[in-house]
């Protein structure tokens, strides 16, 4: 089935795996990087460009001025914000907006219930023509990593440090996840 898809790409493992999944689909696939004021924006943007280039997918960018700066850790409403920005930026009227959230976290915006709520929101605006897709919402991080390895995600090209340091800090939750999973 041919469909259009906009895949949110942060430069991290989860979004890179989502892009790897969608690149197999027929249809117009675009990656979207959003700078919402996160301190790691520059390094995430560079990683998003590397990942999109690896998969031969065009990368669009949106910058939200006036937000942040946001440091490491949980940011209330972030995934809802990203999905709504993607909806507004989508270069098509019908298709998928894909986000690389996964289960195994305590965050409400990484749950099936959250995806269902966002779909109801999108339906208000689009009358069912735009689908919120979170292909890994029922998986844990290790499963996403295994999928990424199988699909040729360039793991060394991804970036996940919440503090935005180079080299990555090694202490934030994202760095600790990568270390525990032996990403690279």
Image (cartoon, grey):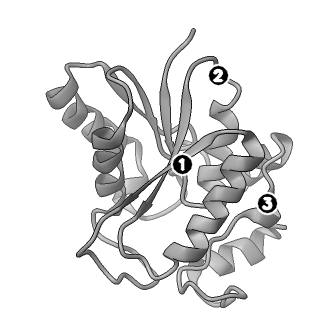
Locate residue 13: give its quadrant. bottom right
Residue 122 shows up from this direction: yes
Query: Pointer 2: what residue?
Result: 25
- Which residue is labeled 1 in the image? 100
Residue at x-position 34% and y-position 84%:
69
Q: Please indicate whether residue 136 sits to the left or right of residue 125 in the image.
A: right
Label 2, secondary structure: give it.
loop
Compare residues 151 and 180 and report the one nearer the observer.
Answer: 151
How many marks the image carries: the answer is: 3
Work out whether 31 lies above or below 49. above
Q: CA distance from mark 1 to mark 3?
A: 15 Å
Of the 4 image quadrants, the one containing the C terminus is bottom right
Judge left or right: residue 29 versus residue 91: right
Could one spot residue 113 in this view of the protein? Answer: no
Q: Is residue 81 above or below residue 24?
A: below
Q: Residue at x 83, y 70 (%)?
A: 182
> Cα distance, mark 1 to mark 2?
16 Å
Residue furthest top in the image = 1
Lower sequence index among marks 2 and 3: 2
Reading the chain from its start, which is encountered first: label 1 or label 3? 1
Q: What residue did someone put label 3 on?
A: 155
> How packed is label 3: few (under 14 Cα within 10 Å), some, or many (20 or more)?
some
Instruction: Report x, y in % for residue 19.
Output: 63, 41
Whether pointer 2 and pointer 3 mark residues with C-beta atoms closer than 8 Å, the reply is: no
- Residue 34 marker: none
Residue drawn at 26 percent across, 19 percent down: 128
Residue 65: % across, % down: 27, 71
Q: CA distance from mark 2 to mark 3?
A: 21 Å
């Amino acid at each position: 089935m041919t469909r259009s898809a906009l895949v949110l790409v942060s430069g991290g493992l989860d979004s890179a795996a989502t892009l790897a999944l969608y690149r197999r689909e027929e249809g117009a696939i675009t990656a979207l990087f959003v700078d919402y004021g996160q301190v790691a924006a520059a390094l995430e943007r560079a990683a998003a460009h590397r990942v999109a280039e690896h998969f031969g997918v065009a990368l669009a960018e949106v910058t939200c001025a006036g937000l942040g700066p946001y440091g490491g850790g949980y940011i209330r409403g972030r995934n809802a914000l990203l999905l709504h920005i993607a909806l507004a930026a989508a270069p098509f009227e019908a298709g998928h907006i894909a986000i690389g959230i996964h289960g195994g976290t305590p965050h409400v915006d990484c749950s099936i219930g959250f995806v269902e709520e966002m779909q109801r929101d999108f339906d208000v605006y689009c009358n069912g023509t735009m689908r919120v897709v979170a292909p890994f919402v029922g998986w844990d991080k290790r499963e996403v990593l295994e999928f990424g390895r199988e699909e040729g995600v360039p793991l060394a090209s991804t970036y996940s440090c919440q503090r935005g340091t180079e080299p990555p800090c090694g202490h934030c939750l994202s760095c600790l996840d990568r270390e525990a999973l032996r990403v690279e």
